[in-house]
Amino acid sequence: MTSTAVRRTALVASAAALALLATACGGSSDDGGTAGDEPAGTERSASADASAGTGDALTAAELEKVALAQDDVENGKVVTKVPADDDVAKDKIETDDEACLPLVHAQAAVAQGEAAADVKRSWTGQDESPSASAGPDGQDMIEIQVNKILLNVASYADGGAEQALKGLNAAAEKCAGGFTATVGSDEMRIAKVTTSAAPEGGDEAFAATLGVTTGADSSAPMKVVVVRKGSTLASFSVVNLSSMVTGEDFEVPTAVVDAQVAKLG
């Protein structure tokens, strides 16, 4: 990844952390109440429930109802209108190996394959845990981990969701040794791809860590999680502010993943 891309990711996460502190991590979405947004916690229509279970592709309006909302999470901030900097178009994504495209699409929160419809969300939150280090006067310290998730919820017809999962698994195997990608104006080098245990709750799922090169001898993890429920895919692209600097591994905020998967029925 270029130094500009790393810097931009860190700045976005830093700004998000400040916003969370200012709003006590529990404020309502600041998306301006755009027309067409459903109130938080709105229940799905009967047709949306049926589509999620039978394999029919949900419409964009139905996806809006089943996508993550502020009331679905206990902490952090959900934004239903993703900022332009995070909303990369599919035709702005390239790789030096086309087989690796599914991984970059997941990392950029772009729908896999030919989706019938898709919607995007973002979530920013923080976890607090006791620090192993004491303060200057011996007092207990707290470590704060700031995480950001870009979320894409997409619907598919004719088995497209199942094919998308197959494509991701094939890409992880083919591209395990790394590849180069361009996302918008940013070029990044993925040093390696490592699959991990996928979350439960869906019909099938995929999880992987992308080791993104940040320097001559350093890399930082970005994580992708994709869960299929019926003909709908929920795709999560996850970054951690500290890990972008230190290169250390981090845990995906499972509560957010579980909350979204639960809404898919």
Image: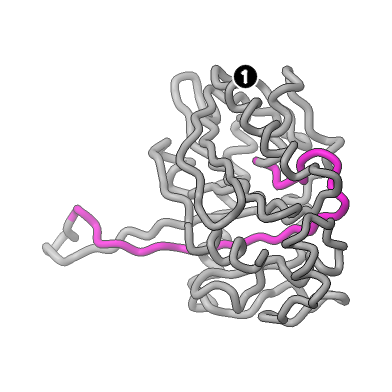
Q: Residue furthest front?
A: 54
Relative image position of residue 230 (x, y in whole percent): 71, 54
Extent of the magenta region: 107-133
Identity of the residue drawn at 53% across and 78% down? 26
Relative image position of residue 225 (x, y in whole percent): 58, 46
Residue 199 against residue 221 in the figure, above or below: below
Relative image position of residue 155 (x, y in whole percent): 80, 54
Q: Residues within 10 Å of mark 1 (few under 14, many from 20)?
A: some
Is 120 colored magenta in this rendering? Answer: yes
Secondary structure under tag 1 reads: helix
Residue 262 against residue 92 in the figure, above or below: below
Q: Is residue 41 left or right of residue 244?
A: right
In this orientation, which residue lies closer to the viewer: 15 or 36?
A: 36
Q: Is residue 128 left or right of residue 264?
A: left
Quadrant occupied by the N terminus: top right
Residue 205 against residue 66 in the figure, above or below: above
Amino acid at pointer 1 = Lys
Q: Is residue 138 left or right of residue 44?
A: left
Is 208 colored magenta in this rendering? Answer: no
Residue labelled with disc 1: 174
Identity of the residue drawn at 61% across and 63% down? 260
Q: What color scheme is it?
A: one colour
Identity of the residue drawn at 59% across and 66% down? 262
Residue 214 against residue 29 in the figure, above or below: above
Relative image position of residue 231 (x, y in whole percent): 76, 52
Quadrant occupied by the C terminus: bottom right
**Residue 119: quarter of image:** bottom right
